[in-house]
Image (cartoon, rainbow, N blue to C red):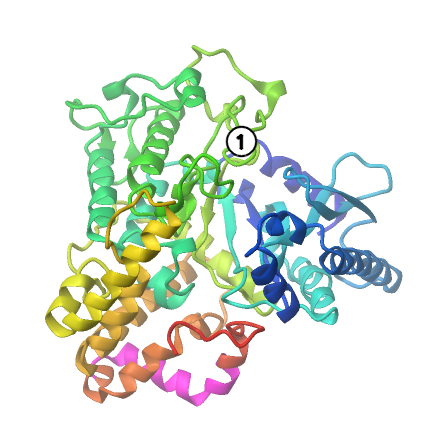
Amino acid sequence: MSREPLFESLRRCKVPEFQSFEDAWVGLEPTFSNRKAVEKWAKMSARPGGEDAYFEDGYMLGKLRRVGRAMEDRYNELRERRDPACLFGHVERKRDRDPWKVERVSLRFTAERGDEEAFEICFGIDPETFEFNIKPVPLTWLRDARFVRFLQLVVWDVPREHGLRPSIGHGGGQFSFSAKTWLQGSLLADDIATKLDHPELSTWICDYPNCDDRAFRATRARFEAFNRLLAAYWSGRFHPAARGAPTVENALLDHGFSPAENPPPDLVDPRHGPVGDARAVFQTNFAFGRATRWRGQNVHPGYWQSQHPDEEGYRPDQIMRYSEGNLNRLQIAGELHVKRGAVLDPESIPELDAPLEASMLYHDASWEQRAHMASTTAADFVSAILLDANHAAWLMANPRVTVRSSLAQDQLLCDAEAVLAQRAPRALSTLKKKARRANLEASRGRMKTDFVEPEALLWAAWKALGGGARAEIAREAILGFVERVESAASMDPRQKQGDPMEQHRHRVHPILWKALDGDAAARDKDATLRRESLAWHEHETRYRKRRPRWSPTDLKAPWK
């Protein structure tokens, strides 16, 4: 990877009309924390004005600056040693402010000193943690071992040397893909359908059950909302031939993306997605994505009780982002940034009555993958991203995902309350009483309901179910993940070596293996499951070391 092709791929990935996977980009958000940062946030945020003071705290700013300076020093050392990770000719560090006026450190990497084209890494402060914002990263870079080494030595190792570690409960490992890439064929709809059909991805595999990254299948109402949107998509109700071509006005005023009532037939081909030219395909998928944000993501998202115009993180137009997938940044030039209100790409705003085109996409328009736990190494983070990217390529070749109406996991999700009503009515009654108090507090007294959060129901239902039911859930979840890994591996452009599960087996929550061990008959009736169980137990110590710790504090994990 010489520097000129390196920056050529960076330039190409920023062009909205270049929709292929070879021209896709990724945004990385690894996080690192320690006991002091977590406890400082808990203490300071509990008092008036404490949240703002936390971001100006001397300890937090000092740690931020030291890590930033050390990252610059580390890269210069690599350059002097001519290390393979030294892909850029020059690095420049500066302290500036992020869009919320919070201090951050920015490292700007260029081919030569003074070049305008740059790759940038930003390091800032977040509640309980320190977070990187690294984008755009050409997807092709992630397949180069030298860039992965660069991430390890500069982004992962330096924070660790300063006492910071990744943890599951404080931060996470979110990343995003360029929206342009997912607006071709029926990929966005199929990716959403896959998440809906495989809730294990956001609960037992890539993440843990939590309201920040709530599963699309977390409640019955949420599940049905996404299903209705998918049915409307495949019946052609978002196609411009059915509802009229969406315009810039529709996007800027955020209206008019409702599905048509009586679409003509055959507007969506089950093998290729929306019919017509590239504009028709883009417009269909853009309209579907915008409708999904308000009609799918917005049904029982995390923190739904807290939405209020005065809540910076929970405004009504933001609240739906607390989902396993987030389309809030599916925007065009001229729209207002969904979080900070700034005008997006003001120099590129098109005419108000112009039909929507891919070229109008905001340069950071993305499909955010929120349901990903922290990673202990750069290689692990990259393998998680490539798993999703390669599976997306598989979906392009195998469209029209079918969503099963019933899963064993529904006992912990859509049907969890019914399970508790039958098996543990006292536990359900206690949860409802606690929920009423919590809902009133979170909503400033507005939400008078005993609605229990899906994650609380999940753990209570898991505890109430018998060993056989838990083993069947584990069986379904693990086999679903193995299928995903094998499908993705079949599309991996890199040279294939050995067992594709080897780099992903540790992602399976250990509690699932424990459930299977308690029911040998369920474990042994499937050859794939038997193989996976054997592989896990044979190298359990190695796999557990790849899993990040839950918390740098004494906080107990929800499954303990």
Q: List x then y, in percent, for residue 266.
A: 18, 28
Along the horizontal axis of the image, is 125 left or right of 247?
right
Q: Quadrant of residue 254?
A: top left
Q: List x then y, in percent, for residue 507.
A: 44, 70
Residue 166 against residue 522 in the figure, above or below: above
Along the horizontal axis of the image, is 193 left or right of 114?
left
Q: Secondary structure at mark 1?
A: loop
Which residue is label 1 attached to?
337
Any part of residue 378 in sight: no
Which quarter shows the C terminus? bottom left
User: Residue at 33% across / 35% down in the picture?
Assistant: 294
Q: Quadrant of residue 197?
A: bottom left
User: Residue at 28% across / 28% down in the picture?
Assistant: 275
User: Residue at 63% across / 47% down in the picture?
Assistant: 52
User: Is residue 526 found inside the magenta-colored segment of the image?
Assistant: yes
Along the horizontal axis of the image, is 222 left or right of 328?
left
Q: Which residues are magenta?
A: 525-543
Nearest the viewer among 80 and 376 is 376
Residue 489 against residue 275 in the figure, above or below: below
- Amino acid at dot 1: His
| Dominant secondary-structure state across the stretch colored magenta | helix
Residue 359 against residue 122 in the figure, above or below: above
Q: List x then y, in percent, for residue 459.
A: 30, 70
User: Is residue 475 found inside the magenta-colored segment of the image?
Assistant: no
Specify few, some or many for label 1: CA neighbours under 10 Å numbering under 14, 14-19, or 20 or more. some
Residue 332 against residue 467 in the figure, above or below: above
Any part of residue 358 in sight: yes
Outermost residue, left side: 422
Outermost residue, right side: 80
User: Residue at 48% across / 36% down in the picture?
Assistant: 310
Q: Quadrant of residue 47?
A: bottom right
Nearest the viewer among 501 and 450 is 450
